[in-house]
Each structure stands twice: as structure tokens, then as C-alpha cells.
Image: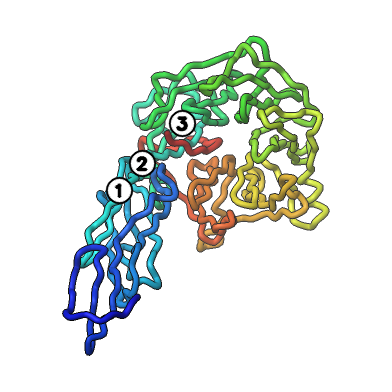
Amino acid sequence: MGFHRCKSVLLSSVVGALLASCNNGVCNTSSVGVLQVSKPVKELLYTGESTTATVSLVGSSGVSTPVLVTVTSENPNDMTVTPYSCSLTSAVNSCQVTLTALKAGEVKISASADGYAPVTSKIAVVIKNMFAYIINDSNDALIGLGTPPSDGGYTQCNVGVNGIESASCTTNTSSIFSQPSAIAFNKGYAYFVNYGDNSYVYCLVNESGIESETCAKVELAGATMDNSRGIAFAGNYAYITNTGIESYVQCNVTATGLIESSTCTDVALSNTYYSTEITIESNYAYIMNSVSYRDYSYLQCVTNASGLINANSCNLVSLGYLFASGGLGSVAAPATVAFSGTYSYMTDSYHDVYIQCSVGATGVESNNCIKVSPKDLSDNNLLDSPMGVAFNNSFAYFVNRSNNYTQCNVSGAGLVESASCANYTPSGIGALNRPNGIAFYGL
């Protein structure tokens, strides 16, 4: 701001120009500045996700009367902006807006205000579809709708800002499946483990979801799959767990995400009988043991930078002992595990609860676990033989063998808000049938 002697009053709405007001020959000058929109923090969003951008009043001085800036989305059907306006001055010269993806597309945002040239973000937000996939080990519920009998398949559902859109769900079945018990995604491929015939199925994935016509079944010749129930990827490796023998299958993975079946081999590992799932998180592999004579336990193993599990590092953690000795009720039977923030969540399919544990630098802190049983308004259990658990955006999902799923809100720290949980039951062509697991994926 400056003061100078002037002979006349200059009034201007030209962007970036100086404004001058004079009184008794003394003029006060100020610069109105220009509007600017930053590039979004995330330039790629999946449906239901959000990011932020900053709207600024740049190069202004002496602007004390708030400038009302309106912020809009080029296509509000694809992406919303909140708040839609903010007031800026030279002192408070920026505001943050939240961009929420609704539908696939490319969207820019614009800012405008009286007396200023409107501006549009230089970078568009690219929005891609996110889908939920629920594994069914039977399709009996669909036979009456004209679907041929088969041994299961998967249900694909759209994901929006409020979570899974159950009305959009479509169940896919095929004779290629034989009681599929797990699903995992890796670089444009979907993988299913068939518990029924000791094989795995892989399919290509595009922006519209799994390309079911590309699915192929693989039966390993150089390694043993025995009632397999889990599959996971880490770096250059894929892992498949067995329930019938104390070992797991380890395979190399190509740069494009394809399992090299000829490289698969057996890795002996004690205390893995009836292993229901494997999950790899932050340099640790977790293998769930959901049987009483393994004392309802899990194995925690170290993985190296390339994703290789060190079988000699595995440590057996007995949840049954912890819960019995800690007075926390019946023993826990972990079926699957997923991670959110600083917490891990295991499903206990025998007792209709989930097991919530803190997670630290050394992995799951088994001495800091609780059992949680979400209830409805009538105090009935929402979980009913929960098998799979997964997280997407700010929601947690537990799939129940009673052909529904439980959706709960999740706090910023990753804590499931059990009081917010509710059950949803897809119907018609999206009906579930003995669901085993759940995963989210988008390209």
C-alpha cells in the first residue's frame, strides 16, 4: 500500500490493476490481484474418492473488503465442489475446496468473482470407476432367475460417495469357478483361488471391471494346492495358502502382473494347517489359522524389499490364549485380516465379531486387541459368520455368510465406528450366495 499526491481519482476493474482513492489530494492505492486455482492434490480419483485444491487471490494488496469467489465444477454430475464459494481478502487470500468424484470422466474447476477474470484449473481431475468384488462359493440363489448351476463366482458392484451401491450389483457365475474362496488384484489382473478343485483363475480387468470372457483356469503341476483359501501379492511374488497341508505356494510374478505358474513351488511352514487367508501389509505377511487345534492363531512373517517371505521369521500368535487368559470371552477364530490406519481388523466367523488390534512399527500388537460385535437398533448382531473384510475410502465392509454385507464408517485414524454399522442385502441379479471375501479395485 502507498500514499502519493495525485491530481485525479483512478477507478479500475481491470484485473491486476491499481485502484486509487483520494481524499484532500492524498491517494491510497491498492492492487486487486488475480484469481488462481492450484492443481488438485490428487489428479487421479476413483469414484467415491475426494481430493482438495486451493483457490487464491494472488498479487493483491490493500483489498480489505471480502471478494466473494464462486467455485464450480465443469461437470457437477461427474464431480462436486464444496464449499462452492469463499470470501478472500489480501490478508486471508486463499481457501481450500474439496473435490468429490461421482462418475468416470475428466473434470476441471473454475473460479470467478465480480471484477475479476474467471480462471480454470490447468490440470483436470481424471476420474475412474471403482468396483467392489464379493466372492461367492455357490450360485444357488440365482438358479431360479435362469442362471445355470455352477460352483460360485463373484459379484461386482459400483462404488460411490456413500459406499457400495448395492442396487448396481451384478453376480457373475461360470463353470470355471469351483467354490472360489479368495480374490486379489495385481496390475490389471484379477485372481481367484478355487477351494473346490485346487486351482486358481485369472482374468483381465479393464475400466469397466473384470472381463469375464478372458478368465482362464490354472492347475499347478510343480506345486501343491490343497484346499487353498488365500492369495496375496507382494513385489515380485504371489502366495497361495493351503488348508490341508502345512505349506504355502510361492510363485514369481512378471512385470505385467501375471503369475508364472511354471515357477510355483511349495514352501513348508509349520503351524499353517487350515490357513484361511494371507495378507501382506507393511513388510509383514499374516496367515490366519481358523481352527481350534491351532488355538485360533495367526502367523506373522517378515517380507523383504522384493516381497519375498522369510519362512524362518514366522511367529505364531495365539489369539485363543490371549482372549481366554484376558477374560475377553470366547476364543477368537480369525478368518481374514485387513488394515486401516493404525488398526488391523480380523473377522471371527465363529463368534460373529471382529477383532480390532493396534498396529505399530513391528506389525500387529496382539497384546492390544479387543473383540467388537456391532448391533442393530434391536440389539441384534449385525455380523453373521463374517468371512471377508476390506476398506475403501471412509468405509469398512464385512461380508457375512448370510448373503449380506455390513458397512461401517471409519474415522480418520482408521477406527471403525461400530455404532454406524448397517447391513445391506443385494438382490435379484446381484444376490450373494455364501460369500467368502471382498476386495476393491479400479483401473
Query: Tag 1, which secondary structure?
Result: loop
Q: Residue drawn 33% across and 57% down?
A: 36
Could you classify mark 1 by the number of other residues whose Cα lies within 10 Å: few (under 14), some (14-19), or many (20 or more)?
some
Taking 127 as reference, is 110 left or right?
Answer: left
Mark 2 vs mark 3: which is more N-terminal? 2
The N terminus appears in which quarter of the rendering?
bottom left
Query: Tag 2, which secondary structure?
Result: strand
- Across and down, in percent, residue 157 comes to 40, 39
Mark 1 vs mark 3: which is more N-terminal? 1
Between 203 and 81, which is closer to the camera in this rendering? 81
Could you classify mark 2 by the number of other residues whose Cα lies within 10 Å: few (under 14), some (14-19), or many (20 or more)?
some
- Across and down, in percent, residue 256 comes to 51, 22
Between 221 and 296, which is closer to the camera in this rendering? 221
What residue would you read off at disc 1? 108
Q: Residue drawn 48% across and 36% down?
A: 134
Label 2 to label 3, Cα distance in Å? 28 Å
Label 1 to label 3, Cα distance in Å? 35 Å
Which amino acid is tagged 3?
Tyr
Mark 2 vs mark 1: which is more N-terminal? 1
What residue would you read off at disc 3? 154
Q: Which mark is residue 433?
A: none
Q: Which mark is residue 126?
A: 2
Q: Residue drawn 40% across and 23% down?
A: 212
Which amino acid is tagged 1?
Lys
Tell me whether circle 2 and circle 1 mark residues in contact (CB < 8 Å): no
Query: Tag 3, which secondary structure?
Result: strand
Nearest to viewer (mark 2 / mark 3): 2
Image height of 109 relative to 200, above or below: below
Between 11 and 138, which is closer to the camera in this rendering? 11
Label 2 to label 1, Cα distance in Å? 9 Å
